[in-house]
Amino acid sequence: MLVGQLGNAAFLRAPLCPDGHLPHEGGDHSLPRLDPSPTHAIFAAMPDTATAPLIVIDLQTGMFDGRFEPPIHDADAIAERTRALIDWARNSGRKVAFVRHDGPEGDPLAPGASGWPVWPLLGQAADEPTFGKRVGNAFSNPELAEWVAWQGARNVVLIGAQTDFCVAATVKGAFAEGLGVTVVSDAHSTLDSDKEKAPDIIARHNEAFAAQGVRMTTTAELVG
Protein backbone atom coordinates (compact mmCIF):
# COMPACT_ATOMS: atom_id res chain seq x y z
CA MET A 1 0.00 0.00 0.00
CA LEU A 2 1.33 3.39 -0.94
CA VAL A 3 0.92 6.29 1.47
CA GLY A 4 1.81 9.80 0.45
CA GLN A 5 0.64 13.38 0.60
CA LEU A 6 -2.06 14.93 -1.61
CA GLY A 7 -3.37 18.27 -0.53
CA ASN A 8 -4.81 19.26 -3.89
CA ALA A 9 -5.15 17.75 -7.32
CA ALA A 10 -5.95 19.59 -10.50
CA PHE A 11 -8.14 17.97 -13.06
CA LEU A 12 -8.19 17.53 -16.81
CA ARG A 13 -11.30 17.90 -18.81
CA ALA A 14 -12.56 14.95 -20.77
CA PRO A 15 -15.50 14.32 -23.09
CA LEU A 16 -17.88 12.65 -20.65
CA CYS A 17 -17.09 14.65 -17.55
CA PRO A 18 -17.17 18.30 -18.68
CA ASP A 19 -15.78 21.15 -16.62
CA GLY A 20 -17.59 24.00 -18.30
CA HIS A 21 -14.93 24.57 -20.97
CA LEU A 22 -15.40 23.70 -24.61
CA PRO A 23 -13.02 21.15 -26.13
CA HIS A 24 -11.20 23.78 -28.21
CA GLU A 25 -10.47 26.07 -25.28
CA GLY A 26 -6.91 26.25 -24.08
CA GLY A 27 -5.37 25.95 -20.65
CA ASP A 28 -2.81 24.07 -18.61
CA HIS A 29 -4.09 20.59 -17.86
CA SER A 30 -1.06 19.26 -15.97
CA LEU A 31 -1.19 18.39 -12.30
CA PRO A 32 0.49 21.13 -10.24
CA ARG A 33 3.04 20.41 -7.55
CA LEU A 34 1.40 21.13 -4.23
CA ASP A 35 3.04 21.30 -0.85
CA PRO A 36 1.29 19.11 1.73
CA SER A 37 -0.14 20.86 4.74
CA PRO A 38 0.26 19.53 8.31
CA THR A 39 -3.43 18.59 8.33
CA HIS A 40 -3.01 16.32 5.35
CA ALA A 41 0.11 14.81 6.89
CA ILE A 42 -1.93 13.88 9.95
CA PHE A 43 -4.53 12.16 7.81
CA ALA A 44 -1.83 10.17 6.02
CA ALA A 45 -0.02 9.19 9.19
CA MET A 46 -3.09 8.40 11.30
CA PRO A 47 -5.88 7.21 8.98
CA ASP A 48 -9.16 6.67 10.80
CA THR A 49 -10.99 4.90 8.01
CA ALA A 50 -13.22 2.40 9.80
CA THR A 51 -16.32 4.44 9.04
CA ALA A 52 -15.18 5.95 5.74
CA PRO A 53 -18.03 5.71 3.23
CA LEU A 54 -17.51 4.56 -0.34
CA ILE A 55 -18.26 7.26 -2.91
CA VAL A 56 -18.81 6.05 -6.48
CA ILE A 57 -18.15 8.94 -8.87
CA ASP A 58 -19.93 9.30 -12.21
CA LEU A 59 -20.15 5.61 -13.14
CA GLN A 60 -23.13 6.33 -15.33
CA THR A 61 -24.57 4.47 -18.29
CA GLY A 62 -22.77 6.75 -20.75
CA MET A 63 -19.44 5.63 -19.33
CA PHE A 64 -20.15 2.02 -20.25
CA ASP A 65 -22.61 1.58 -23.10
CA GLY A 66 -20.52 3.10 -25.90
CA ARG A 67 -23.58 4.62 -27.49
CA PHE A 68 -22.22 8.16 -27.93
CA GLU A 69 -18.64 7.91 -26.67
CA PRO A 70 -16.22 5.03 -26.26
CA PRO A 71 -16.54 3.26 -22.91
CA ILE A 72 -14.03 4.19 -20.26
CA HIS A 73 -10.84 2.17 -20.26
CA ASP A 74 -11.23 -1.38 -18.93
CA ALA A 75 -14.94 -0.72 -18.42
CA ASP A 76 -16.02 -4.29 -17.66
CA ALA A 77 -13.27 -4.75 -15.07
CA ILE A 78 -14.06 -1.38 -13.50
CA ALA A 79 -17.70 -2.42 -13.15
CA GLU A 80 -16.69 -5.77 -11.62
CA ARG A 81 -14.32 -4.14 -9.13
CA THR A 82 -16.93 -1.53 -8.28
CA ARG A 83 -19.48 -4.22 -7.47
CA ALA A 84 -16.92 -6.00 -5.31
CA LEU A 85 -16.12 -2.77 -3.46
CA ILE A 86 -19.80 -1.98 -2.94
CA ASP A 87 -20.24 -5.44 -1.40
CA TRP A 88 -17.16 -4.86 0.76
CA ALA A 89 -18.54 -1.55 1.98
CA ARG A 90 -21.95 -2.98 2.79
CA ASN A 91 -20.48 -6.02 4.55
CA SER A 92 -18.15 -3.86 6.63
CA GLY A 93 -20.95 -1.56 7.77
CA ARG A 94 -19.93 1.38 5.60
CA LYS A 95 -22.33 3.55 3.69
CA VAL A 96 -22.27 3.84 -0.10
CA ALA A 97 -23.16 6.93 -2.12
CA PHE A 98 -23.28 7.48 -5.85
CA VAL A 99 -22.41 10.72 -7.62
CA ARG A 100 -24.12 11.49 -10.93
CA HIS A 101 -22.93 14.18 -13.32
CA ASP A 102 -25.71 16.36 -14.72
CA GLY A 103 -24.44 17.46 -18.11
CA PRO A 104 -25.78 20.35 -20.18
CA GLU A 105 -28.62 19.89 -22.66
CA GLY A 106 -27.52 17.70 -25.55
CA ASP A 107 -24.72 16.05 -23.56
CA PRO A 108 -24.73 12.23 -23.18
CA LEU A 109 -24.89 12.77 -19.41
CA ALA A 110 -27.65 15.39 -19.47
CA PRO A 111 -30.58 14.70 -17.14
CA GLY A 112 -33.01 12.42 -18.94
CA ALA A 113 -30.48 11.33 -21.57
CA SER A 114 -29.82 7.64 -22.01
CA GLY A 115 -26.31 7.98 -20.58
CA TRP A 116 -27.38 9.85 -17.45
CA PRO A 117 -28.52 7.12 -15.00
CA VAL A 118 -26.12 5.33 -12.68
CA TRP A 119 -25.01 2.18 -14.54
CA PRO A 120 -27.67 -0.35 -13.52
CA LEU A 121 -25.26 -3.28 -13.47
CA LEU A 122 -23.53 -1.77 -10.43
CA GLY A 123 -26.55 -2.77 -8.35
CA GLN A 124 -27.24 0.45 -6.46
CA ALA A 125 -29.54 -0.30 -3.52
CA ALA A 126 -32.70 1.70 -2.93
CA ASP A 127 -31.32 3.22 0.29
CA GLU A 128 -28.00 4.30 -1.28
CA PRO A 129 -28.28 7.99 -2.19
CA THR A 130 -27.35 9.68 -5.43
CA PHE A 131 -25.86 13.18 -5.35
CA GLY A 132 -26.03 15.25 -8.53
CA LYS A 133 -23.37 17.72 -9.63
CA ARG A 134 -22.67 20.00 -12.57
CA VAL A 135 -18.90 20.42 -12.19
CA GLY A 136 -16.06 18.01 -11.54
CA ASN A 137 -15.93 18.19 -7.75
CA ALA A 138 -18.61 15.99 -6.18
CA PHE A 139 -18.41 18.13 -3.03
CA SER A 140 -19.73 21.07 -5.04
CA ASN A 141 -23.05 19.59 -3.95
CA PRO A 142 -23.10 20.52 -0.25
CA GLU A 143 -25.49 17.68 0.50
CA LEU A 144 -22.66 15.19 -0.06
CA ALA A 145 -20.50 16.76 2.66
CA GLU A 146 -23.53 16.87 4.95
CA TRP A 147 -24.17 13.16 4.31
CA VAL A 148 -20.54 12.30 5.15
CA ALA A 149 -20.62 14.45 8.28
CA TRP A 150 -23.92 12.92 9.41
CA GLN A 151 -22.14 9.58 9.69
CA GLY A 152 -19.36 11.05 11.80
CA ALA A 153 -16.83 10.06 9.14
CA ARG A 154 -13.54 11.89 8.78
CA ASN A 155 -12.42 10.01 5.67
CA VAL A 156 -13.86 8.92 2.33
CA VAL A 157 -13.02 6.16 -0.14
CA LEU A 158 -13.22 7.27 -3.76
CA ILE A 159 -13.66 5.28 -6.97
CA GLY A 160 -15.16 6.07 -10.36
CA ALA A 161 -14.56 8.28 -13.39
CA GLN A 162 -12.99 10.12 -14.87
CA THR A 163 -9.55 9.81 -13.29
CA ASP A 164 -8.16 13.04 -14.68
CA PHE A 165 -11.18 15.20 -14.12
CA CYS A 166 -14.00 14.32 -11.73
CA VAL A 167 -12.02 11.92 -9.54
CA ALA A 168 -9.10 14.33 -9.22
CA ALA A 169 -11.47 17.25 -8.64
CA THR A 170 -13.31 15.34 -5.92
CA VAL A 171 -10.02 14.50 -4.19
CA LYS A 172 -9.35 18.23 -4.07
CA GLY A 173 -12.87 18.91 -2.87
CA ALA A 174 -12.67 16.29 -0.12
CA PHE A 175 -9.47 17.80 1.25
CA ALA A 176 -11.09 21.22 1.17
CA GLU A 177 -13.82 19.75 3.40
CA GLY A 178 -11.15 18.61 5.88
CA LEU A 179 -11.54 14.94 5.02
CA GLY A 180 -8.91 12.26 4.65
CA VAL A 181 -9.01 10.52 1.29
CA THR A 182 -8.44 6.96 0.14
CA VAL A 183 -8.40 6.22 -3.60
CA VAL A 184 -8.67 2.66 -4.89
CA SER A 185 -5.97 2.72 -7.55
CA ASP A 186 -7.50 0.08 -9.84
CA ALA A 187 -11.12 1.22 -9.51
CA HIS A 188 -11.05 4.53 -11.35
CA SER A 189 -10.73 5.05 -15.07
CA THR A 190 -10.84 7.49 -17.95
CA LEU A 191 -10.61 7.79 -21.73
CA ASP A 192 -7.60 8.22 -23.98
CA SER A 193 -6.69 11.85 -24.61
CA ASP A 194 -5.12 13.21 -27.79
CA LYS A 195 -1.65 12.90 -26.27
CA GLU A 196 -1.88 10.11 -23.69
CA LYS A 197 -3.42 6.68 -23.36
CA ALA A 198 -5.84 6.03 -20.52
CA PRO A 199 -3.58 3.55 -18.64
CA ASP A 200 -0.81 6.16 -18.58
CA ILE A 201 -3.21 8.85 -17.36
CA ILE A 202 -4.40 6.55 -14.59
CA ALA A 203 -0.87 5.57 -13.55
CA ARG A 204 0.31 9.18 -13.57
CA HIS A 205 -2.57 10.31 -11.39
CA ASN A 206 -2.10 7.42 -8.97
CA GLU A 207 1.50 8.51 -8.50
CA ALA A 208 0.48 12.13 -8.06
CA PHE A 209 -2.25 11.22 -5.58
CA ALA A 210 0.13 9.10 -3.50
CA ALA A 211 2.92 11.66 -3.60
CA GLN A 212 0.67 14.42 -2.34
CA GLY A 213 -1.38 12.84 0.46
CA VAL A 214 -4.00 10.34 -0.64
CA ARG A 215 -4.01 6.94 1.04
CA MET A 216 -3.73 4.52 -1.90
CA THR A 217 -5.03 0.96 -1.92
CA THR A 218 -6.29 -1.66 -4.38
CA THR A 219 -9.51 -3.60 -4.71
CA ALA A 220 -7.78 -6.82 -3.66
CA GLU A 221 -6.35 -5.20 -0.52
CA LEU A 222 -9.82 -4.15 0.58
CA VAL A 223 -11.98 -7.09 -0.41
CA GLY A 224 -9.42 -9.80 0.33
Image (cartoon, rainbow, N blue to C red):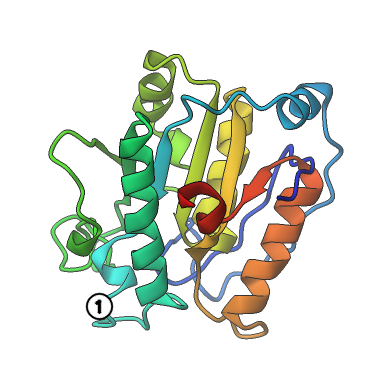
In this picture, residue 103 sits left or right of residue 172? left
Give the quadrant of residue 194.
Answer: bottom right
* Residue 104 percent across, percent down from the top left: 30, 58
Q: Is residue 40 above or below residue 160?
A: above
From the top left corner, tell me how far across and down residue 30 is, in percent. 74, 63
Local crowd size for mark 1, using a 10 Å CA cut-off: few (<14), some (14–19), many (≥20): some
Quadrant in the picture for residue 214: top right
Q: Residue furthest front?
A: 224
Whether 37 is drawn above or below 194: the answer is: above
Residue 154 vs 184, above or below: the answer is above
Q: In this view of the protein, which residue sits in the foreground, 126 or 30?
A: 126
As drawn, is 59 to the left or to the right of 159? left
- Tell me if residue 58 can be seen: no
Between residue 139 and residue 4, name the one nearer to us: 4
- Residue 69 in the image: state x and y as whole percent: 34, 81
Residue type, label 1: Asp
Residue assigned mark 1 = 65
Secondary structure at badge 1 equals loop
Report the side of 39 relative to 17 (left or right): right
Which quadrant of the structure image shows residue 132? top left
Residue shown at 12% from the left, 39% from the top = 126
Placement of 170 over or under 111, stated as above or below: above
The residue under the point 39% across, 19% down is 146
